Image (cartoon, rainbow, N blue to C red):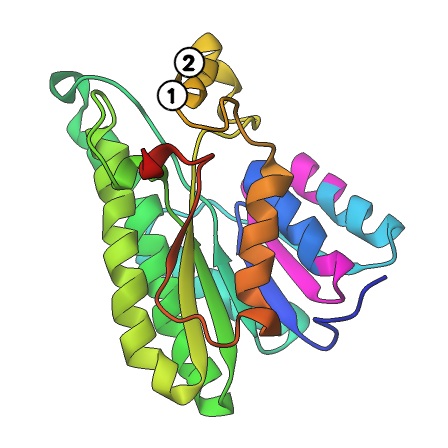
Amino acid sequence: MATALSGRTALVTGGNSGIGRATAVALAARGATVVIAGRDAERGERAVRQIEQAGGSAYFVAVDLDGERSARELAATAERLAGPIDILVNSAGIFPFGPTEKMTGEQFEQVYALNVKVPYFLVAELAPRMAERGHGAIVNVTTMVAEFGLAGMGLYGSSKAAIGLLTRSWAAEFGPSGVRVNAVSPGPTRTEGTAVLGESLGNLAAAAPAGRAAAPEEIAAAIVFLAGDEASFVHGAVVPVDGGRTAV
């Protein structure tokens, strides 16, 4: 097992499926102890077993992330389980698509609670403690549709556009204390969550130079890079991993 991240502890939200799980597995493979946070206990325990069977170390925290309180409680629980958090990956998110007039107030609140409030207050809890120790890495997961307009994706895209701005603001705020904050902006990716999109996912992916959807592991590779020492001079970047869609 590679050990580039040995001795470090990572918290991955949404780590029981999709991009989050692929990221948790990859971080553990590089030696990090990983705390996986998610709603589905069965998937979470399965992810922990996968990591442990490969020789890694992981914990699962069953949590319904829905705003400030849940974020602060998760931060405290993760540190009780595994010690100080060195790496935070904000991967959990929801992505309802549809016409603006069809979105309800409840959907609006749910999207912003999970996609914006949870990362905000996890950073509020964990980044100052990272700064006190003089090191840390935070990687946020956004989306390519935060970078350009696409019909039916305004609610989701706007929530992730907020995360792009927060990434740059947090880099300015915490970077001088040794905490690097960056983001990855994925394109269409085949996960459990996007399976419901059916052919529309492939159609969306076909517009990019790569001409296909990504595997979760391809997005995770960029996240793990930004979390590690190889990216020591990267601050405030939003890295597109979208098959070239935002380049054309």
Name the foreground residue: 242 vs 27. 242
- Give the amino acid type for the residue marked by disc 1 in the picture: Ala
Above or below: residue 154 compared with residue 28? above
The residue segment tinted magenta is 28-46
Could you classify mark 2 by the number of other residues whose Cα lies within 10 Å: few (under 14), some (14-19), or many (20 or more)? some
Percent coordinates x, y for residue 177 in the rendering: 40, 88
> Looking at the image, which residue is at 34% across and 39% down?
247
| Residue to which mark 1 is pinned | 207
Marks 2/1 in contact by CB < 8 Å: the verdict is: yes
Q: State the residue at coordinates (88%, 49%).
A: 53
Q: Nearer the viewer, residue 75 or 150?
A: 150
Quarter of the figure that contains the C terminus: top left
The answer, for residue 75, to whether it is visible in the render is yes
Which residue does the image show at 56% across and 74% down from the upper left? 86
Horizontal placement of 167 versus 90: left or right? left
Image: 179 above or below 108: below
Label drawn at residue 180: none
* Residue extending farthest top: 199
Q: Which residue is depicted at the point 28% across and 65% down?
A: 168
Q: Is residue 202 above or below residue 68?
A: above
Q: Please name the residue that numbered disc 2 is placed on.
A: 203
Q: CA distance from mark 2 to mark 1?
A: 7 Å
Secondary structure under badge 1? Answer: loop
Q: Give coordinates of residue 92: x percent, y percent.
A: 46, 45
Q: Point out the residue furthest to the left here.
A: 101
Name the amino acid type tagged 2: Asn
Q: Is residue 183 magenta?
A: no
